[in-house]
Image (cartoon, helix red, strand yellow):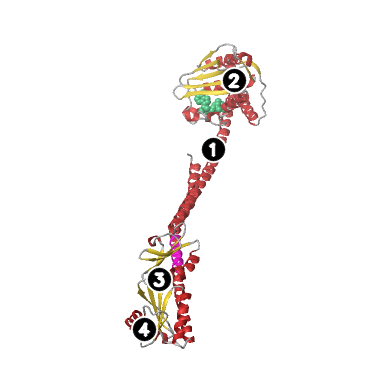
Amino acid sequence: MNKPIKKITIILTVISLFPIIFFSINEYLSLNKNEKIIQDIYKNQLEAIIFSINQYSDDIVRSWMFKTEDIIRQNKDEKLLEKSLKEYLPITQSVKNIVLADTSLDVLIAAKFSDSELISKIIKNNINLVRRFFIYKNQNYQKIESIDFGEDVLLLFVTNNDKICLFQLNKKDFVTKNLSGRIRSIASDQFMVGIFHSGNAVYSTENFTIEEAQQRANFWLIPGYQLAMSVKGDTLEEIIHTRIYTNIALIAALGLLMSIGMYFVYRNIKREMELAQIKSDFVSNVSHELRTPLALINMYAETLEMDRIKSEEKKKEYYSIISGETNRLSNIVNRILSFSKLEAGKRNFVLEKIDLNEIAKKIYATYLHHLQNRQFEFLFVTVGEIIIKGDKEAISEVIVNLIDNASKYSKEIKKIILRTGIQDGFGFVEVEDSGIGIAKEEQDKIFDKFYRASKGLIHDTKGTGIGLALVKYIVEGNNGKIELESDTSKGSKFRILFPLEEDKKYV
Ligand code: ATP
Ligand code: MG
């Protein structure tokens, strides 16, 4: 990789990787923070809901308390008071008995007398509590104390009318009759709420165990009872995990997208730079190609002009060098013109019936002397007439270019075989050399315009890199195809195939 491309690669990597890494770390850190915040919010919310259920139960009992005080106030007569209390019991739905005692602790009035003895004993046992309640009451604060009473609970308080009051409340009825409606409306379809006793649900909106609950708290009014609740559907952990996974997937997708984008940017820049490099190479190659024959022509012409050469033989030799170099010059110019015409799409091929063998033979005759002069062994192997449809001039150009390459890229073994033949309905012409060969990875590229292989003796061989591009254009324009066999230890074989004329195909 050359220096600027390396630099661009590093810059692109830094540009694309830094934001991704920074974003990922930041996201990961904030995830943990967010997770904690969400957890706290949920915990607080569940706590608040549980608190509201406890508060609601307390409010119910306090409403009974106020009602009882009202009843006491309105019924001075004991019998009427008893009757009114009895009538009030069913309205509460879960209070089985209301017992009133005065400060002497004798049972004065009870809605029902079934457990009165026992209840008065309980009040006596809690005498210290009652005393404290009287002190609270004088400070305008009414406290309620729950005392466990089997399947019931006794709620003890002091009334505004200085009576000790006791509600005998059925635990289960209170939960199922007084609270269930409220619990159901709180739960709606968002939460699961339940009231549990020793691990068993006394009431619950959904089938769940107390261990599964996300938040638990004691039920204030009933000793031993617990309120428990959970978020319905996905648990908190699941929600957070889903969020983490979604974010990670998003980051990964973003990273992938950026990498793909960067890859395309990188590829385009690389291609542009390579093209710029190739173009500048082309310009210097062309200049070099033109300068050498021009210098030779100039040198020999000047020598002749000065009339320094006396021998006719030498003069002839100089003239022939000048004409040879002029030919070379015009070849180069013609090739460049031909190439630019093809590039611009301005060259039209005239396809007509031609004998490929005849064309090859003519070129062989033209180049034999020239190549032999350069110590080449030049052979022509043929099968006879090969009629194809093609542009004669253009196909000649192809063969000349291939022979030119074969001679240019041969080193120790100077042997070129020009061969014509027939293969699977195609007529072909082939140029084989025993030269430097072409590395496998370059075999696709040598047909690109301006491309010159970077290995071997290429740097001391002149060329513009358009010969094979020209060959490819022409072959495609004549409906032909190219086959290349090349090995850096054996040499190269370029075979150009054209479809045989229909009536000649099966001969
Ligand atoms: P020019 O435009 O003058 O022909 P060139 O010969 O360098 O220049 P191409 O004919 O397009 O350009 O060939 C492209 C490259 O393919 C050459 O530079 C050379 O590296 C490689 N190549 C072509 N023919 C052969 C061959 N017969 N043996 C080895 N290498 C070859
Ligand atoms: Mg060439």
Real-space CA distance between mark 2 and mark 4, rounded to the nearest whole angstrom:
119 Å
Quadrant of the rendered image containing residue 354: top right
Residue 274 badge: 1
Relative horizontal placement of residue 104, taking residue 436 as reference (left or right): left
Asked if the residue at label 1 sits under 8 Å from ligand 1, the reply is no
Write down the residue under mark 2: 498
Residue 171 badge: 3
Quadrant of the rendered image containing residue 350: top right
Residue 307 seen from this side: no
Residue drawn at the location 54% of the way across and 38% of the way down: 271
Closest to the camera, between mark 4 and mark 3, is 3
Closest to the camera, between mark 2 and mark 4, is 4
Instruction: Say whether disc 4 or disc 3 marks the residue closer to the N-terminus.
Output: 4
Q: Residues within 10 Å of mark 1 (few under 14, many from 20)?
A: some
Residue 119, x across and y down, in percent: 35, 80
Which of the two residues, 486 or 35, is positioned nearer the viewer here? 35
Relative horizontal placement of residue 348, taking residue 182 as reference (left or right): right
When the figure is inspected, residue 434 is found, relative to residue 27, above or below; the finding is above
When the figure is inspected, residue 243 is found, relative to residue 347, above or below; the finding is below
Write down the residue under mark 4: 130
Q: Is residue 40 magenta?
A: yes
Real-space CA distance between mark 2 and mark 3, rounded to the nearest whole angstrom:
103 Å
Identify residue type, mark 4.
Answer: Val
Instruction: Say whether disc 1 or disc 2 marks the residue closer to the N-terminus.
Output: 1
Identify residue type, mark 1.
Answer: Glu
Residue 414, x across and y down, in percent: 48, 18
Asked if the residue at label 3 sits under 8 Å from ligand 1, the reply is no
Q: Check whether the beta carbons of the residues at disc 1 and disc 2 lie within 8 A of each other.
A: no
